Image (cartoon, helix red, strand yellow):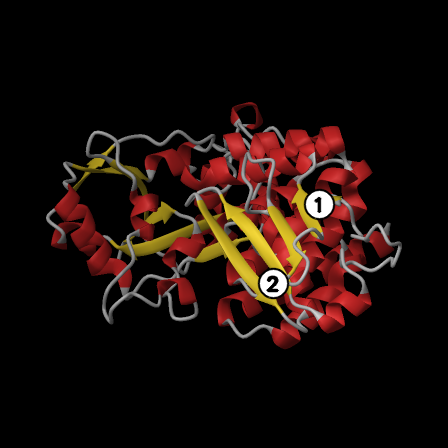
Amino acid sequence: LKIRTGDSQISNDKGAGTVSPFSRQEWDNDKIICIYYNPPTRHVNEKVFADDRKGFFMSVLGAKTLGIGEDFLAEFRLESDTSTVAEIFPNGLEKELIALFAQAKGEFFENGVPTYFSSQLMKLVKQRGNEAVDILIDLIVAQEVNAEIASETLRWIGRMEDPITYSKRRLLLVSGLTSKSYLIRDGAILGLASMDDPWTMPYLERALEHEQIPELREDIEQVLEQLIETQQEYSAE
Amino acid sequence: VTFVLRKVVRNRWHKHAYNPEFGWLANGEISADPLRDLGTSKGVLSVYIIDDPSNIVTLNRVTAGMACTTESLSNFEYVLFSLDAIAQAGLRLHETLGDTPDSYVNDLHRDIIEITARKLVDLLHIVWDDVTPIRINEKDVLKHILAGVSSKYIEPSKIRITSTKLRQALDDL
């Protein structure tokens, strides 16, 4: 059973239609072992999931980002039946984006200054449209990519001028507001400020209720003020 | 008190308290990240002099001029620190013209010169406690640039930003 990580739903060949490659019965009676390959350290890691479906799903998401430049990302098997194996493979575009994030680790980011990373990112999003943004949502929400680079991504995503991907990019930015990483939340706030879309106000208001960091609270308040002004400008027109 | 303005990336200047990635830092220690915003070339660091930081008009004019030198319209982030800190770190200033499309702003430009690694780290330690990074959102940066163009402070042909948003706004002026 081969699973493309670009698939939004992972289902087994028994047609259960769940996101697990194994049936409910197998889940209930057995342990699932996840073996994943970690290219930077050349280590093969093993993790056992028993009655931990959430952990399993997170591992599937996490496994996506581990295989930089590699074909094999992870395999899942039942403890009692080694022949039942699900393997995770990235799709081509996802591999390209993962590699781009990996290359960007040494880059110096400065406001308003495009880098190789931002230029390539914009190019991929323009060329591949919503498919690329969907993968970015997966990578950034799963928080398996470097937070500083994810934050930089969100800044450029908000700044980009591309009507075709507008709604998806807006979705990516509002998703970033709930990230555990303050750097990602910061990037999302900046991206939304650049997008200047009053539709995002309820999401920012909700984020303000939960935000603990004073600077980010001030930023959200500032963006909300800006969006009220934008809304008034639209009304006046 | 005269201040010095340096463009930075705000996240590198946080005080680390809420970033678990900096849990390893001992009390009183500063991560090396802010040094990335104090990158020198031939021992020289570019800054702008601000005589009165409470004068928002001047501050906006300086940041708008500086923002015009980048390729993309974006938020602008900076720190201000006391001019005295430069002497305390054993450093000195040299008057050189800036490279913005606003000649008034260019006159405020200075180079901190003859910087050694030790003096740069000393400077960071001297300013760290009093420094608060400031952010101006992209929309306000655009407003300040347009105000500069309207007032004829900024020469539009010298703006390096290649954003459609800015071009459209300039056409609408």
Among all residues in the image, which is located at the extreme top? B157
Secondary-structure class at tag 1: loop
In the rendered view, tell whether residue A114 sits above or below residue B122. above
Chain containing the residue with disc 2? A
Among all residues in the image, which is located at the extreme right? A15
Residue plotted at (65% across, 35% down): B166
Please tell me the numbered disc located at residue A5. Answer: 1
Instruction: Report the label total.
Output: 2
Does residue A9 appear anywhere in the picture? yes
Does residue A111 appear to the left or right of A237 in the view shown? Answer: left
Among all residues in the image, which is located at the extreme left? B90
In the rendered view, tell whether residue A220 sits above or below residue B79. below
- Crowdedness of circle 1 by 10 Å Cα count: few (<14), some, many (20+)? many
Does residue A190 appear anywhere in the picture? no
Percent of width and height locating residue B107: 34, 35
Task: Specify the amino acid type for callout 2.
Answer: Ser
Secondary-structure class at tag 2: loop
Sequence order check, earlier mark of 2 and 1: 1
Identify the residue under disc 2: A179
CA distance for labels 2 and 1:
21 Å
Chain containing the residue with disc 1? A
Q: Quadrant of the N terminus of chain A?
A: top right
Residue plotted at (35% across, 49% down): B5
Percent of width and height locating residue B156: 57, 28
- Crowdedness of circle 2 by 10 Å Cα count: few (<14), some, many (20+)? some
Does residue B118 appear to the left or right of A220 in the view shown? Answer: left
Which residue is at the front of the view, B103 or B96?
B96
